[in-house]
Amino acid sequence: MTETISIPKQDIRKLTVAQIKDWLTQHGEQGFRAKQIAEWLWKKSATSFDEMSNLSLKTRELLSEHFDIKAITNAKSQKSNDGTVKSAFKLYDGHLIEGVLIPADDRMTACVSSQVGCSLTCKFCATGYMDRKRNLDAAEMYDQVVAIDRQAKENFNVALTNIVYMGMGEPLLNYANVLESVEKITSPDGLGMSPKRITVSTAGIAKMIKKLGDDEVKFNLALSLHAANDLKRNQIMPINESNSLENLAEALQYFYRKTKNRITFEYIVFHNFNDTLQDAKELWEFTKKVPAKVNIIEYNPIAEADFKNTGVDKLEQFARFLESKGVIVNVRRSRGKDIDAACGQLANREKNA
């Protein structure tokens, strides 16, 4: 008896329009259908070939026989008391990632993941205590945006206005896929969002920051800084040992020369660690190296670490010092803490496959 071997179907979203056109013509189909298929995939966010109503049944069946659309699915969502929605998204291979909808008076933001887990082991971040399983592909990041936009419309009757790559993973260690996802999200042939509404956050990988400059990206860049001297930063962010503040400053200056995009420094103020006026002075000195603004972020405790948020008085004193030196400062209050959806808290409590 001959055993039948099932060959996994390729995700059609891995193909370019030109590759789809070639495949169609090789299978006796009309090449112009490729553009229609791409429109269904990237403008209309179709998750099945059955939805492609301007294709013949025969063409849809042919596509279904040879290809998949490996769309993410929503495994579970939780809504915070403040309106924040955290979702566990299931990938085609069973892995779970998290994405967050963050509502505010003036914006509706999607926080998306770029990897399953993370390899950087930042000591204050729940994702840093997970293993990195794999990178997400461009379509899986695109799918998070589509799903969270749907949640924004369902819950608040407002479309997404902003996207931050600040979820699980280090985006610059998944460089090509992140940039491809941004292209799909911003293209007129995709979701058509402005790149100025997108921020990619990095823990600080100097050579990849320079590459962003070489690629002259249009989106915003944020650096998770959290300490402006190497000794302290090494303690909480091991990546700093191979990407010192001096190297990062040089890379950021290069990025700015190439793009003219102001940098955002993210700074969590930890109790009795980096919350003194001396720490604020060091941060001010670092901000002078490149046009920048500072987001001071309230810390969200996690079970794996002993860090605590600084007191309100110290946080305000820290911010006032920076403002007195002419630094643009935003104090970001935590959202979604009650459902572990706040900054630094993303780590699937469900078991990953």
Image (cartoon, helix red, strand yellow):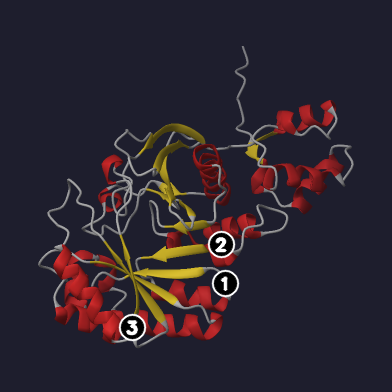
Quarter holding residue 60 = top right
Q: Amino acid at mark 1?
A: Val
Q: Residues within 10 Å of mark 2 (few under 14, many from 20)?
A: some
Q: CA distance from mark 2 to mark 3?
A: 26 Å
Give the mark, 2 or 1, whose residue is nearer the N terminus.
2
Specify which label sits upstream in the sequence, 1 or 3. 1
Farthest residue, direction top: 1
Element under label 3? Answer: helix
Most extreme residue toward the front, as rendered?
105
Left or right, 96 with reference to 300: right
Distance between the Cα atoms at labels 2 and 1? 9 Å
Mark 1 surroundings within 10 Å by alpha-carbon count, few (fewer than 14), some (14 through 19), many (20 or more): some
Kind of residue at disc 2: Leu
Residue 180 place in picture, x, y as percent: 59, 58
Residue of label 3:
287
Q: Quadrant of residue 61?
A: top right
Q: Which residue is mark 1?
A: 217
Question: Secondary structure under badge 2?
Answer: helix
Circles 2 and 3: CB atoms closer than 8 Å:
no
Identity, as a three-letter code, of the amino acid under mark 3: Thr
Residue drawn at point x = 77 percent, y = 46 percent: 20
Task: Identify the residue at image location x=41%, y=64%.
Answer: 201
Say above or below: 78 vs 225.
above
The quadrant in which the N terminus is found is: top right
x 70%, y 47%: residue: 43
Judging depth in this view, the residue of 8 and 315 nearest the camera is 315
Image coordinates for residue 183, horizontal then vertical, percent: 62, 60
Q: Residue at x 83, y 41 (%)?
A: 24
Q: Mark 2 sits on what residue?
A: 179
- SS category of the residue bearing label 1: loop
